[in-house]
Amino acid sequence: WKAVGLCLALYVIRMFGITAGYHRYFAHRSYRTSRIFQFVLAWIASSAAQKGPLWWASHHRHHHQHSDQEMDVHSPEREGFWWSHVGWILSSKYEATDFNAIKDFAQYPELRWLNRFHVIPAVVLAVACFLLMGWQGLVWGFFISTVLLYHGTFVINSLCHMFGRVRYKTTDTSRNSLLLALITLGEGWHNNHHYYATSTNMGFFWWEIDVSYYTLKMLSYFGLVWEIKKPPQRVLVARG
């Protein structure tokens, strides 16, 4: 049970790295932080084995520009569930990083290094899990947790464009889902996000649970992050 607890803890910590780091910070710049803490976020997210921060953010920016259109690399509307869920990230077709799409962060040599050697944080974590709890720590703390992270993250690319409620009219099939928001620490409010992508919080209303936003808000009290962006009133009152 300790190994299972480690599995869940590392799922939550690394999911925060993906949602608050790769997504809301590197892809959308929805808040500001220091150069040191941005590297910390990138390291935590890289330990999820979903490639590097510049690769991840550049592909996500491309997705927002072409969501559910012909050039979208993971549209369930066009390519089907399995491709949008996990097929695209396993394809050699999308291994390259488009540095032109991420010039703002590509200027940092430490991020370029981490983007190139993105497997290092995952290997370090795997070794730490083994040293901490032996084979159970490695299997549950790293491997099972990482598989759960993959599917937990990628349901946003797939299921959040297939099932859920639509609050805002957008040019894509993005939807809101409480269940997927719980699994992904707030990313399930996907229709909200596609309507107003620069907001730090994806749960626009108090009843829309967004754990990553709550955590970032807490970190702001300690001065680790600042200039947290929220949707303006015109967005909150908009419908359909």
Image: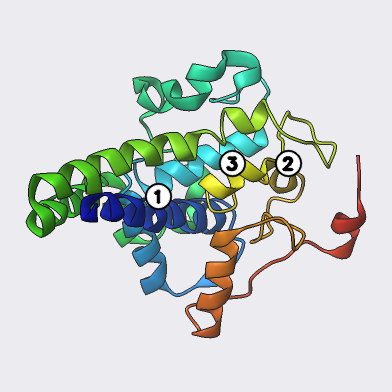
Residue 49: image location, x then y, percent: 30, 42
Find the distance from the CA under tag 3 to the CA under tag 2: 12 Å
Give the residue type that dot 2 points to. Asn
The residue wearing badge 2 is 191
| Left or right placement of residue 223 versus residue 178 in this view | left
Dot 3 and dot 2 residues touching (CB under 8 Å): no
On screen, 103 above or below 171? below
Task: Say whether residue 75 is left or right of residue 90.
Answer: right
Q: Residue drawn at (60%, 47%), measured in percent from left and top?
A: 181
Mark identifier at residue 216: none
**Which picture quadrant has residue 91?**
top left
What is the secondary structure assignment of the residue under circle 1?
Answer: helix
Determine whether label 1 and label 3 are within 8 Å by CB. no
> 198 or 169, which lies in front?
169
Q: Secondary structure at mark 3?
A: helix
Per the image, the residue denoted by label 3 is 180
User: At which x and y percent is residue 109?
Assistant: 31, 60
Identify residue type, mark 1. Pro
